[in-house]
Amino acid sequence: MNQVPFLNIEYFFSQIYQFFTGNTLSRFWNWVADVFYFIAPHTRWITILISLICFAGIIYAVLQLRRLNEQVQEKYLADYHALNAVEQSRDGGNLLRWDKIAQHAGSQNPNDWMSAIIEADIILGEILEKDGAVGDGVGEMLKSLTRGNLRTLDNAWEAHRVRNSLAHGGSSVLLNNREVKRVLSLYQTVFEELRFI
């Protein structure tokens, strides 16, 4: 005679009932109680140990943050001092500033490329202002000049337009190392005419 398979729900619920009322659950609760009664007398020492570990972790984190902060300051202070060594240099710091721009241009980092072009434009503004060009900003000062005043005026305009597109477009402007060097060569012709370098 063939047996008919069926789900014995009564057996299923009896197993659940036995788990919560029978030996399995009571053994588990006995084990929990034993652990608790073993730990309870030592709670003070355990909390002291955990507190000491946490305190040591805090001290370690603070020391690591301080070390990291010192490294960051050393890196950026070195750059700052190099750019601001103008008074200490015989040529007024011009070549030092231009060398720093050239280093940024030779980098593999696009942010350094942007910094090189922006710094070159800042220098252009300083030179034009010192030479008596009139206007607010480099663009206005360039408008006040003619090719009679500045033979490399077209180069200055082209370089300044690239700088403006970077300033307004930011990271959306696609730059490559060749273009950066081309733009800086434009600035270089202007700086040479104005005897900056």
Image: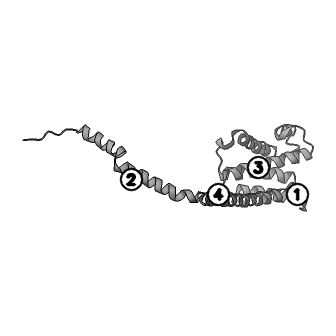
Give the residue pinned by disc 1.
86
Secondary structure of the residue carrying numbered label 4: helix
Q: Residue at x 82, y 47 (%)?
A: 122
The amino acid type of the residue labelled 3 equals Leu
Location of the C terminus by quadrant is bottom right
User: Mark 1–mark 3 contact, CB under 8 Å?
Assistant: no
User: Mark 1–mark 2 contact, CB under 8 Å?
Assistant: no
Label number found at residue 25: none
Secondary structure of the residue carrying numbered label 2: helix
Give the residue pinned by disc 3.
186
Location of the N terminus by quadrant is top left
Q: Residue at x 68, y 49 (%)?
A: 179
Q: Earlier in the sequence, mark 4 or mark 2?
A: 2
> Which-is-in-front pick, marks 3 and 2?
2
Give the residue pinned by disc 2.
27
> Which-is-in-front pick, marks 1 and 2?
2
Comparing 128 with 62, the one in front is 62
Please identify the quarter of the rendering in which residue 125 is found.
top right
- The span from disc 4 to disc 2 (Cα, nearest Å) is 33 Å
Q: Earlier in the sequence, mark 1 or mark 3?
A: 1
